[in-house]
Image: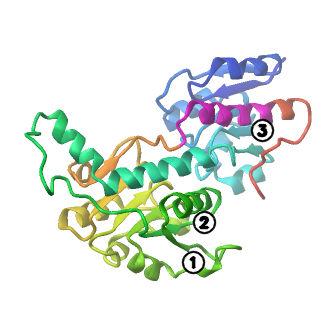
Amino acid sequence: MKPHLLVARRLFPDLLEPLVAHYALRLHDHDEALSPAALQAQMQGCWGLLGSGSERVDAALLAACPDLRAIALITVGYNNLDVAACRQHGLLLSHAPGVLTEATAEFGLTLLLATARRVGESERFLRAGQWRGWGIDQFAGLPVMGRTLGIVGLGRIGQEVARTAQQGLRMQVLHHSRRPVAGWESGWRSLPDLLAQSDHVMLCVPYSPDTHHLIGAAQLAQMKPSATLINLARGGVVDDRALAQALIRGQIAAAGLDVFEGEPTVCTDLLACDNAVLTPHIASSTLPTRRAMVQCAVDNLLAWARGEPGPTPIPQ
């Protein structure tokens, strides 16, 4: 009998087709994430999980699903997995690094420009029928070209943002990471210095207990009142309630967020901020990129079915 594989999201049927030769697919063919209880119920008897970043796999789930032996994620991030517990149970683990770097970096700069130039506010104004004519300072935004961009987290995506910002927008790039990155040493700053010196700050760090609320009230107070904050990382890296208060009080000029604490629920105070551009976790959402993410997970599952190592294992 074929091992059972839970596909925990609506994905591209043509990309899933090769799996049918090796696995009995159990499809959750919806965009809404399974609740923890529903995930546990659906996982009963399953050898594998093809998932996203929404399915929490911890010691309790593993104890309740003793047949689980493999998890292939379509995402680069894997903070939804208790990796230590998974390894203790001997699970095969994979993710999708590299395939979404360019699309995510591109969207980070899109969000930066939209936030600085008040695109969201001005579009809502126009759609509401409030535009009565051109004004000399109407929706005057913040300049980006030639300004200083501070990037927190200089991994693949952060470096792609940095290169594009330098080459396309002539920005000076500063960065903060746990240690200086080869080739970028001169731009390294401590986090307080980066926040104080940057005209625009973009977050590209992975989520972990160490980066939970990395940006909170104290850090927002260190930024320029004319600065913007862009969260391209993960919900939880920013204290969203503290950010909303900083926006309301004018501590910083604006924010652009693609990720949120507790998403898809969004802090109501943020929703009320006109100076916040909010998008529903779409940074990697180009069709070629999303297909490549799914293909990466499929390739790992096919390799495992042949008894081979997967091409993109979650690092030890």
What residue is disc 3 on? Answer: 69
Q: Quadrant of the N terminus?
A: top right
Closest to the observer: 186 or 284?
Answer: 186
The quarter of the picture where residue 312 lies is top right
Label at residue 187:
1
What residue type is disc 1 on? Gly
**In the rendered image, the vertical position of residue 19 relative to residue 175, given as above or below:** above
Label at residue 154:
2
User: Cβ–Cβ below 8 Å for labels 3 and 1?
Assistant: no
User: What's the CA distance linking mark 3 and mark 1?
Assistant: 43 Å
Question: Residue farthest to the right?
Answer: 307
Local crowd size for mark 2, using a 10 Å CA cut-off: few (<14), some (14–19), many (≥20): many
- In the image, taking residue 112 as reference, residue 142 lies left or right, namely left
Task: Give the image location of residue 171, x and y in percent.
Answer: 48, 67
Task: Give the image location of residue 249, x and y in percent.
Answer: 18, 67
Q: Is residue 211 something one can see in this rendering? A: yes
Q: Which of marks 3 and 1 is nearer the N terminus?
A: 3
Q: Is residue 259 something one can see in this rendering? A: no
Q: Residue at x 49, y 65 (%)?
A: 170
Q: Which residue is drawn at 43% across and 68% down?
A: 146
Task: Give the image location of residue 92, x and y in percent.
Answer: 79, 43
- Residue interval drawn in magenta: 284-301
- In the image, taking residue 265 as reference, residue 48 lies left or right, namely right
What residue type is disc 2 on? Leu
What residue type is disc 3 on? Arg
Disc number lying in front (2 or 1): 1
